[in-house]
Image: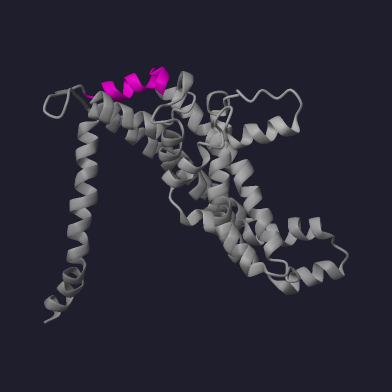
Amino acid sequence: MKRRLNLAPWLFLAPFLGLFATFTVWPLIQSLALAMQQTYGPGTTQWVGLHNFKYLLTDPLFWKATGNTARFTLGSLFIQLPVALGLALLLNHPKLKGRAYFRLIFFAPSLVGLPFVAMLFAPIFEKRTGLLNVILHNLISGWDPEFAWTQNYIMSALIIAALWMYAGFNMVYFLAALQNVSRDMLEAAEIDGAGPWQRFRHVILPEITPIAGFITLLSVIGSFQLFELSYIMLNNTAGPDNRGLTIVMYLYQTGFQTGDLGYASAIGWVLALMLITIALIQRRLLKRHEER
């Protein structure tokens, strides 16, 4: 009887463990084995060991893609997150009328998909007839309406499009964190003569740091996985001089256009290691903050 009771939890876990092993563990093992092969189409493979990883370290296109992805990530972190926090602080103010409607308006863009956002913003950045060029031509004397944004400032265009889509999404997380900040501490700081900036720095910011760290990690992971937005906005290309090439786009080109699934798998594993490293570093920093 006791043995049957000991087996009971495993019987309940068996469906999950079976699905997890079939659709997660086994594909990971297969992808790691594939990363050590060179493929020539779906049926021809050759074992090359760590050659794919060694070549990746000297591959100029991979480092070009990594640099582009890093620039997009930094732009998202230092533009998108402060905007999201600013919106959250504004919409958390109790005296602001219509806060619920403004929250819905700013959050609504995150409900649409990335392909829709890419198709929406692509005409805005077109030369001559693009909305942005038309506005700047009317505001700035001598502005060239032939200026091609998606050729000269690809990352800027992508960051603006991502800002429109994700600022409201991150705002919701910040709003949830701000509503958990102790009102007693804010009132005590105000009574002690602390101004808005001092209250934000010494009361609000320490309280929302764990949530801010979580949002930062989500933003980094999402930015490193950038693919649809740039691929569609650049008409299924990487742009001139590969200025819009990202790591995931390079993985797609290598695996599904070139046909070298082994090298594409190696790129995927390196990307996964990058994200794991970033997550561990961030966890260490947050742990140090909590220990202070």
Say which quarter of the image contains residue 174. bottom right
Residue 271 showing in the rendered view: yes
Which of the image's four quarters has the N terminus?
A: bottom left
Point 15% across, 29% down: residue: 42
**Residue depicted at 59% across the width and 37% down the height:** 75
Q: Position of residue 64 (x, y in %)?
A: 46, 23
Q: Is residue 210 shown left or right of residue 37? A: right
- Report if residue 189 lies within the magenta region: no
Range of magenta residues: 49-61
In the rendered structure, the answer to whether residue 223 lies left or right of residue 270 reads right
Q: Position of residue 98 (x, y in %)?
A: 68, 69
Q: Which colour scheme is used?
A: one colour
Q: Is residue 85 above or below residue 57?
A: below
Note whether 56 is above or below 173 in the view shown.
above
State the residue at coordinates (88%, 64%).
Answer: 193
Residue beneath the point at 24% across and 25% down: 260
Q: Where is residue 35 in the image (x, y as percent from the top left)?
A: 25, 30
